[in-house]
Amino acid sequence: MTPRPGFVLDVDRSTPPILFHHGEQFRLEKLPPERSRVVYPAEPIDPIRDPDAAIRRALAEPIDSEPLAALLTPGMKLTIAFDDISLPLPPMRRPDIRQRIIEAVLDEAAAAGVDDVHLIAALALHRRMTEAELRHAVGDRVYDAFAPDGRLYNFDAEDPDGLLVLGETDHGEVVEISKRAAESDLLVYVNINIVSMDGGHKSVATGLSGYRSIKHHHNVKTMQRSRSFMDRHASELHSANWRMGEVIRGAGVKIFQIETTINNATFGDDLPMSVLQKREWEWSGKDRAAFIGMKAGLDRLPTKARRKIFQGWRAPYGLTSVQAGEVEAVHEVTTANVFEQHLVPVEGQTDVLTMGLPYICPYNVNSIMNPILVMCLGLGYFFNLYRGRPPVREGGVVIMSHPTPWEFNPVHHPSYIDFFEQVLSETTDPVEIEATYEQRFAEDEWYRHLYRTSYAYHGVHPFYMWYWGAHALQHLGGVIIVGGDRRAVKRLGFRPATTLTDALEIAEDVVGPQPTITHIHNPPILMADVT
C-alpha cells in the first residue's frame, strides 16, 4: 500500500484531542475549533529491501566520482569519518546503517590491500562517545578490530597536534580540520541524514573541525540571517560551510562522501509505542487502550524511570536511499530524498505555533534534556523545520509543551550548568551573551580538560545552543512553555503556563483575541513547506 502523504487538518468541533509530546510524558489537548490546524507528517516511505546490496551499488556506481574500488591502492592512507551519536534520533536498531556502510568500505579496502586505516567519530565540539555508543554505531566486529590499537577514536577538537589549518575562505573564515583526515590519500565520510540540515560540506567542515573554524558560522549574526537551517539555500550556516568546503577541496583533500536517508518510522506500526505514529481520529479501541495505559503508567513513574524507558528506545527506521561520490552532487540527491519524506504543503501563517517537545534532541542522547536544550529543540530545531517562511507570522507566539526541569547531567553538560546559573541570570540577549561571555567559556581550561578526557560537551557548546534559537527570538513576539518548571522557564526569559488554555490566553496579550493556531504534530519529523 502506498504511504499517505502529510497533510493539514482544519480543526472543527468533531476533532478529537490532539496528542502533544511532553518530554517523557504525553498530553491530550483540545485545540480551539474553526481557527486551529494540525500539520501531520507523511507515513513512512517504504524502505529499501536489501540495504547491503544498495550500499555496494552506491560504492560501485558513485555520482561524479570513480568507484570506491578504483580510489583504493596498496600503501595509501585511508580515513573513514562518521556521524556521531547526535544522529539519528532516537538511535536506530542494530545494525546501525553506519555499521553496514563502514563494513562495506573496509571490505573493499582489504581487497585493495589498504592497511593504514583510521576511523574517526566526527564529534566537532560534541561530547565523546562511550565504548557502548561506538559499538552501537560501527558494530562489534569493527570496534574490536580497530579500537584496541587506537585506530578507532573520537575526534578531538582541542588536540593542538591533531589539527591542520588549510587556509581561509574569501570571507576570512579559518578552515582547520583533523590533521589525519587532511593528510589522508582518501577521506570517506559516512553520513546519516535525518533532516535536510545534515550532510554536504557540513559533514567535514563542521564535524572534523574545532572552535577556530566553527565560531565563524555558529554565531549570532549567522543564525539571525539564516531563514531556516533546513533549507540550505536560505541558510547562512550552510553558506559558510560550503565556502569552507571549497577551501578543503582546493587544499587537495579528496573526499568520497556517502550519504543516506531514512524513513520516519520512529515508533513502528506494531510495536509498544506505535500508537504515536498514528492519527488520533484513526485510533482503534486497542490503540486508545494502549495509549491510556501507557500514559497512566508513565505518569506514575518517577522521572528517572521514565527517562530510562525512553532513552532505551531504538527506532525501527528503514533505509530509503544511499548515494556516494562527490560531496555536492551526492547531497543534492540526498536532500531531494529527505524532502520526499518530510515536506508537507502548508498555506499561509498563523498567529500562534504550538509544539509538543519530546524527550530527545541531538545533545541529550543517554542524558538529560536540560532547560537550555529545551529552548534549542523548540526554537532552534522545531521552529526551523520549514521551507519558505515560518508557519507562525512575525510577531507571533510559540507555545511549547515540556516539563523543562531545572536539572542537568553534570558529566555531559558542566558548562551548561554555569551558563544557566551565571549567564542567563544576567541576560538572555544572544548578542550580549556572545560579546560578554563566549570567549571565556570557550577557552576555559577546565571545560577543555573535561571535553578531552571525560564525556563533556565543549565549554562553548551551551552558547551555540542559545544562538540556535536566535532567528526564532528575533521573529517572535513571545514564547510560552506549558507544564514547565516555572523558575526554569522564567530563567530562560519565557512565560510559564499551567495548561494550554492558559497559554492561549497569555498569547492573546501579544497577538490579539481569537488567534489562529498551527500545531506541528511531531515526532515523527516533518517539514512545513509554507507558501
Image (cartoon, rainbow, N blue to C red):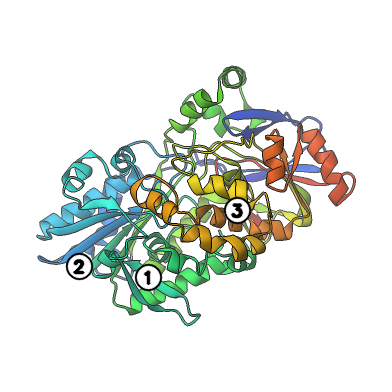
Mark 2 → mark 3, Cα distance in angstroms: 39 Å
Q: Mark 2 and 3 residues: CB-CB less than 8 Å, in contact? A: no
Looking at marks 2 and 3 on the same chain, the residue that comes earlier in the sequence is marked by 2
Secondary element at image label 1? strand
Q: Amino acid at mark 2?
A: Leu
Q: Mark 1 and 2 residues: CB-CB less than 8 Å, in contact? A: no
Q: Which residue is mark 2?
A: 71
Looking at marks 1 and 2 on the same chain, the residue that comes earlier in the sequence is marked by 2
Looking at marks 3 and 1 on the same chain, the residue that comes earlier in the sequence is marked by 1
Vertical order, 374 against 161 (above or below)? above
Secondary element at image label 2? helix
Residue, x 66% and y 60% (percent of image)?
A: 471
Residue, x 42% and y 52% (percent of image)?
A: 446
Q: Which residue is mark 3?
A: 380
Q: Residue furthest front?
A: 445
Q: Which residue is mark 1?
A: 176
Mark 1 → mark 2, Cα distance in angstroms: 25 Å
Where does the C terminus fall, quadrant-wise? bottom right
Q: What is the crowding at mark 3: few (fewer than 14 residues within 10 Å), some, or many (at least 20)?
A: many
Residue nearest the observer in this picture, 252 or 153: 153
- Disc number lying in front (2 or 3): 3
Secondary element at image label 3? helix
Vertical order, 270 against 350 (above or below)? above
Q: In which quarter of the view is residue 138 placed?
A: top left
